[in-house]
Image (cartoon, helix red, strand yellow):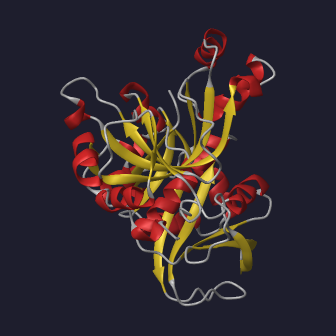
Amino acid sequence: MSRQLRLTKFRELSLADPFFDSLKAGYQNFSAWFARKADEDLYVVVDGSYLSGMIYLKLEDHPVTDVDPPLPNARWLKVGTLKIEGRGTKMGERVLKKILDTAILEGRDGIYITVFDIHADLIALFERYGFVRHATKTTIDGIELVLVRRLDHFTGNMISDYPFIHTAGQRYWLLAIYPEFHSQLLPDSILNNEPKEIVEDVSHTNTIHKAYIGRVPLTRLSRGDVVVMYRTSDGKAPAYYRSVATSICVVEDVRRKQDFSDVDAFVDYARKHSVFDDNTLRDWFVTNRKLYVARMTYNAAFGRRMTRGKLLDEVGITEQPRWDLRELSSEQLHHIIDMGNVDARLIID
């Protein structure tokens, strides 16, 4: 069973679980703090019945004065406690995406986390996505680094600014994906009607980076291009009603089959963020003369479904050329974003 990220209450967890041993050893008041939080929410990482992670998020609307130098008065999301056992890029991404999604939903100005400097991998992950070392925090347990990410300051880099989307100077596309792959690759885009429902979706495949693999020539795409993912019809009714635009991604990299030295190089590149297992990837590489891979960031799921009919009648996308990879105008992209109830903050230019 894959590791799952899910929402629960402190009272549903047992401090006797071995998972908490290191936290109790590292923080003298951890047990008393844990007891006070009984009715509060937190995210946990579970593998069956095995607890392997916890993430506690707290909203703060004031200056943060227990760090040096202090953080200014703002609407902060504090990552109060974060522990993930084991290594692996995907779980780190899932956790970080959940933190960022929560901060956007709650209208936060910034996020901060305190962490001991021995956790080098965790620090590197947060720094990759725009967190900077701003301060230190001194307690009876030692000195922690304070990592801060402002959500109103941007660098122009698509990774450190994630999930915010730069649209100026880019091209915009509609890219089709079959239903059988859609919910695996883009789990937040299962099309619940309420944004809160989407943020609380806890699918284990919810990562920041996605690998889209297919025979459609993707070399028209360039780094930074904005892609609207379009789930084709499931056959239960005409595509006019059943095909839907679901989410927004941003292109990181595009490669062709001939860009890989051999099948192993292809599998190594694609496996981390693909819905396919190694055997399926190998089969695709061997049996397809033409094959393309687009690696993208998964930036936003639409809060409202947009059927093919709405895209034709309201957005003005014509029937032809085909919608497997279809360029959009700036006006069409922004119309789709507005119709899809995407948080306006995410579009920064």
In this rendered view, identify the residue nearer to me: 148 or 40.
Answer: 148
Q: Taking 304 as reference, is 19 left or right?
A: right
Q: Taking 133 as reference, is 60 left or right?
A: left
| Position in image of residue 146 (x %, y %) | 69, 74
| Position in image of residue 201 (x %, y %) | 38, 47
Q: Quadrant of residue 72?
A: bottom right
Q: Quadrant of residue 320?
A: top left
Question: Image height check: is 278 above or below 22?
Answer: above
Residue 166 visible in the shown view: yes
In this rendered view, identify the residue nearer to me: 59 or 223.
Answer: 223
| Position in image of residue 195 (x %, y %) | 32, 58
Question: Image height check: is 339 above or below 260?
Answer: below
Residue occupying image coordinates x 65% and y 30%: 270
Residue occupying image coordinates x 35% and y 55%: 336
In this rendered view, identify the residue nearer to me: 153 or 52.
Answer: 153
| Position in image of residue 95 (x %, y %) | 55, 52
Q: Quadrant of residue 212?
A: top right
Residue occupying image coordinates x 76% and y 19%: 264
Residue occupying image coordinates x 48% and y 66%: 347
Q: How many marks?
A: 0
Residue 85 visible in the shown view: no
